[in-house]
Each structure stands twice: as C-alpha cells, then as structure tokens.
Image (tube, rainbow, N blue to C red):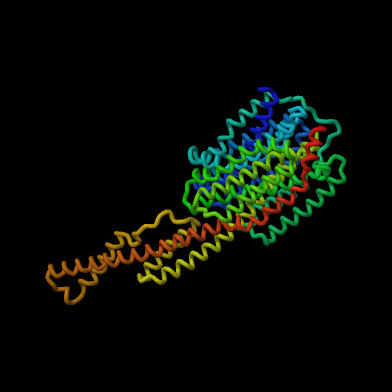
Amino acid sequence: MTKTTKIIITMALGIFLCLLDTTVMNIALPAIQTGLSTNLTQLSWALNSYTILFASLTIPLGRVADLIGRTKIYVLGLSLFLVGSLSSGLAGSVDWLIFGRSIQSIGAAIVFPASMTIGIQAVPLAKRTTAIAMLGVTQGLASAMGPTIGGAVTQWFGWRGIFLINVPLVVIALISCVCLLDWHDRRPDQLRLDWLGSGLSMVTLGSLTLALVKGSDWGWTSELILGLLGLSLLALIGFIVTEARVSQPMMPLALFKARQFNGAALMTVLSGIFLVALLVLMPSFFTKVQNASELMAALMITPASVMIFIFSPLSGVLLGKVGPRLVIAIGTIAMIGGYWQLTMMNPNVYWQVMLAAMLIGGGYGIIIGPITVLAAADFTGALLTASQSVIGVFRQIGTSLAVAIFVSALSTNLVTAKQHIWRAAQANVSELAISTQAKRDTLTQVKTQLATEKTPTQTTKTFITPAKTKRLIAENEASVLQQPQLVQAPAAIKAQARAQVRQKVTNSVALTNQRIYSAVLKIKHQTKRELTKAFIQPYQRALPFTFVMLLTIGLFDRRRDYLTNSVSK
C-alpha cells in the first residue's frame, strides 16, 4: 500500500468519525435518558450542541488550519475529538455529557475540512477525482450508518460504548498522522484571518442551526425563534458584504461563481434532507409502533446504508463516462421513487419499507460521490479548502433542516393522533355495560399508554385482577350476610349464600373483563393506525418537494462539456 493511499484512508477515518457522531446518538437517547436520570429536553442539548458547533465553526476553523498549518491543527482536532469522546463516554451527568459533546464538535469542525484538504492534496492531480470520490463516499456512509452502529453498540455495550468506541480509532488515526503527514507545512506569507467574516459566519450559522433544531420545541412563531432567524439573516447580509470587500475573505465569494459548485451545494442540502428524514423517523416508527428493539430498528434501515456503500463508488466511475447531469438525474429519480414508495406502502410489511430504503439509499449513493467531486470544481489552495468547508456546512444544514422539518411535522401529527385515539377510547368505553369505576380505570390505562406514544405491546385479558376479584367477593359476601334473614341463619345456609355470591361476582368479573378486552383491542388497533399515519404523513407531504432536486440538474455540465474539461486538465 502506497503512502498516498494510507493518507487517504487516515483522512477517511477522521471524516467517518466526525460525521458518524452527527447521527449515532439519536437511537440511544432512551438508554442515555435512563442511564443519566434526566429528561429528554436537557438531553437534547447533548445532541444539538454537536450539530450547532460543528456547523458554525467548520468554515472559520478550516481557515485557521490554512494559517497555522493543516497537520498541526488536524492533530489538535483529533486530540479534542478524543478528549470529547472520553468525556462523553464517562459522563456521570447530562451537563458533563453536553460538555463532552461540545468538545467533540469543536474537534470535528477542525478535522472535517482539514481531512478533505489534506487528502485531496496528498494525491497527484490526475488522481484527484478518485480521492475526492472516496472521501465523499465516506461522508455519506458515516451519516447513513450512524443509527445502525448506534443501535448495535448500545445493544451490546451500552450507551457509553457509542462514544468510547471512538477512542481506539482516534488513537490509530493519530499514530498514522505522526507517521505519514508532513509536519513542516508552514503558514503562507501575508495570509491573515478574516476576523469579522469569521464572527459573522459563526453568528449566521449558529443562530440558524439553533432555530432549526429548537423550532419545534420553542414554537416556530415564538419571539425567540423569529429573533434567531432575523439575527441569522442580518449576520448573513453582513457576512456577504464583508467577504466582498476584504482582501483575504474567509469564504471567497468566487466559489459561487462556479455553476457546478452551486449545484453541488444545493444538491448536498436537498439530498441530505431526504436521506436524514428516513434515518430520523423510521427507527422511531419501528420502536414505537412495531415495538422493535433499538438494534432491530437500526438493522431494519440498514439497506439504505448498504445501497450507499454499493452505488457511491459505481457512480464515481459512471461520472467519467456519462457526465454529471445523467448521474445526478438517475440518483434523483431513485430518491423520488423511494419517497413515492414510502407514501404508497404498508409500513407493517417490511419488504415494502426495505424497498423504499433501498431506493433512497441507492439514489443518495449515486448522488453523493459525484457531488463531492463536482463541489471541488477546479479549485486549488485556499479556494479548495473553502469549498470543502462550505460543503461540509451545507451538509450540516441539510441534516438540521431534516430534523427540524420532519420531527416538527411528526410532533404535530402525534398530538393530533393522540387526540383521535383518546376521543375514540372515550366513546368505546362509554358504551360498555360495566361499572363507572371500571370505565375510569380503563381510560386511565389508555391515558398512561398514550403518554408513551407507543402501540401497546400486548393486551391482557385480565383487567380486574384476581386480588381485586377477591376483594369484590369479600365485600359482596359481607353485604349479603348482613341481610336480616341471613344473620341468624344456619352455617349451611350462609355457606350456600357465600357460594352464590362468589359465583355471581366471578361471572360478572369475567363478563366485564371480556367487554373491556374487546374495547381495548379496538383502541389498540386504532392506536396503531393513528400512529402509523402520524409517521408516514410527513413523507407523503414531502413527496412533491423531492421533485425540486430535478431543478438543480441544469446547473451541472452536459456530458460533452464535462468530458472535454476533464481531458484538458
């Protein structure tokens, strides 16, 4: 294995770890919540801090790497990621976990852009496309495999394992860096950091990402969310003005003069939204509606990851033969087909879900390899570094948008579903010929189950327990034996009265249990229907928007132009 290949593999490992941790934690949230005895609102900040800091710091820290030296800053980033992983894995409280995740995200914001630049510049120009494609495939695979790896590691090693598993891998990456990388890359003369641009970019992306991830919790029309969005817009305007005027912009606006870079940026966001939407909602559907384990839920969406793994390298080869427009079109049509399948399928029939996952994963795999290559365009030096940082930010924005849009839609749907279920339950129970107390007890059980937002795992047929039946028998016996004609009656007569009471109460309890069981069975089926609808409806509403991806195809070169430019390089 050549030194160049080893460098590419090392950089791919760094990218994989950084992007894996954007999705690996989601499926382990219930286990972490139990382990740290915290609520989901607090715990969500451990998830959000990674996304917000990663998105807002990637561009400025990519520029810092150019100033200080990429190898030095890259090793620093890996070290921070290692410390953050250890802190997260050993956390004894949710505050410590949030701190560890924040350190992780700062390390990731350093590692990601530096990995792309070091990897690309390590290969000769003739092999650059292959290197970019490999690193791009790694990005897609890492995001897609997060839930699968998270579910498997949580099942076998506990939730701490999803963080601690990073430690040996980062150590391997650090050793490889020491052995392979050039430590004498020096700061270019006259190169300065665009402080104002850096600050404005962090405000723009930080406030935007915070608004996206907390919009559902805080309310999209709340003053806080509207204020964050307004701040992001103002900071963005200031950022554009600053970058147009400074001599050494942190993010050169020349990037956006390249048509294919614009197409790549848009497609990164759009394809990311529709892929992450599958990864976010479907595992929850499997655990909440179908009562699957976290590991099984993760495995059930693994076909998407497998298809990305298969088609990403194939699309890189195809790009050089048929040009970007056709490749992007094929991937887009596959993803649209996957969403069409999501809207038409019976989600309780797994092969239909698997087909949708395969189409979406295959389409994304076809898109992601070429997109990474096309985003680099003909850039070199600072422009190349900036292009990779910007694409990384757009990837995070796509992830944040997917979570914000689809989780918000699901939350709204679940509220509506629970209202429908509760009204149906009240109607069903009110019609039962049972005691008022039994009705209240039944509705209390329904309300408790609704709070979990899950389909009941099993329906018992014994709602009035044997212990309660004994109490009812004892109460009725005491009441009957107090009747004047039985107070002085012989023991044999009293025993006969007791037997009659026991038989009557037993028959009454059996009939009541049967009636409650029939009602609860109806409520269970209603719950499953309503929750299934709540999970599938966001995909149905998203289907028309998937066609927007087709509009970006015109931004890419035609086959003739692309192949001509490739030959001339």
* Nearer the observer, 565 or 439: 565
* Nearer the observer, 81 or 334: 334
Residue 560, image x and y in percent?
A: 79, 40
Residue 282, image x and y in percent?
A: 55, 50
Instruction: From this view, report whether residue 490 is shown above or below residue 299.
Output: below
Q: Quadrant of the N terminus?
A: top right
Residue 45, image x and y in percent?
A: 61, 48
Q: Residue at x 20, y 68 (%)?
A: 500
* Nearer the observer, 274 or 231: 274
Tell me how many marks there are: 0
Residue 328 in view (yes/no)? yes
- Indicate the quadrant where residue 506 lies: bottom left
Residue 111 in view (yes/no)? no
Q: Horizontal placement of 90 versus 206: left or right?
A: left
Toward the bottom, the furthest residue is 484
Residue 472, image x and y in percent?
A: 28, 66
* Nearer the observer, 27 or 31: 27
Instruction: From this view, report whether residue 503 is shown above or below residue 305.
Output: below
Q: Residue at x 76, y 29 (%)?
A: 126
Q: Residue at x 35, y 70 (%)?
A: 434
Q: Horizontal placement of 90 versus 525: left or right?
A: right
Instruction: From this view, report whether residue 122 is shown above or below residue 142.
Output: above
